[in-house]
Image: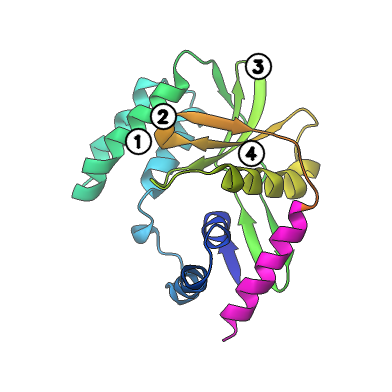
Amino acid sequence: MPQISLTDFVDVVSKAGRPKATKVRQVKERPEYEPAFDFYKSLREHVVENHRKNGGKAAVSDVMNSLTDPKKIKSYPEILNAYKKWWGRKDLTWFNPPRDVYSAGGFDILLNPELGLVVNGERHIIKMYLKSDALTTFKTELIIDLLEHQLRPKAAPTDNFSVLDVRRSKLFSNGPHFPASLSIVNAEIAYISSIWQQ
C-alpha cells in the first residue's frame, strides 16, 4: 500500500488545479526515503534528543557543531533561534508521543508527531512545521484533526494535539474538532489515488 507523509498530504491538499496534480506526481516519483535528502532531519532529531535528555534551551543550537552542509549551516540558525524564542521561559518536560497510520482509499498517511512535551503543566503532542511556506489555518486544522482522529485512543484524555510553526515561534493547539473534515481527507485521498494510478 502506498504511503504518504502527513506533510506531503497537507501540501497536496492545500494546492488546486494543475499544481495539485504536479505535487502528487512529484511525491510518487520521489526516490524512497533517503535520510541524506531530508534537509531538516538532523535538526528535528537533535531537538527531540535534547528534550529526551532534558537538555537546556541553549543546547538546542549544539546541532550546528556537527553540520558540514553549507545550506544547513546558513539556514539552521534562524530556525533554531525561532525555536528557542518559542521555548522562552516555558517549563518543558518530555514524554513519548504516540504514532500511527491513517489508512483510506488504498493509501497510508504516516502520522508521526515529533514532540511530546508537558508545557507549563499541559501535555502537548506536537507536529513540528519547519517549512518557510505559511502555515495556514486550513493546514493547521487538517493536521490537528487527523492527529485527533487517529491518535486520540493512544493519548491521555487531556492531551492537546498541536502544530508548532517553528519559524514563527507559534504553537497552535486543539480547536473544535469537526468529524466532517475526515470526509475532506478521504476525498483528497481518492483524488491522490486517481492521479497516482495514471
- What residue is rendered at 48% in x and 70% in y? 27
Q: Nearer the viewer, residue 35 or 18?
A: 18
In this rendering, would 102 be left or right of 70? Answer: right
Q: Is residue 91 above or below residue 66?
A: above
Marks 1,2: beta carbons within 8 A: yes
First along the sequence among labels 2 and 4 = 2
Q: Which residue is mark 3?
A: 121
Identify which amino acid the numbered label 4 is placed on: Pro
Q: Secondary structure at mark 3?
A: loop
Left or right, 89 with respect to 110, comes to left
Q: Which residue is mark 1?
A: 79
| Disc 2 to disc 4, C-alpha distance | 19 Å
Q: Is residue 183 magenta?
A: yes
Residue placed under numbered mark 4 in the picture = 97
The range drawn in magenta is: 181-198
The residues tagged by marks 3 and 4 sit, at their Cα atoms, a distance apart of 16 Å
Q: Which tag is nearer the camera, tag 2 or tag 4?
A: 2
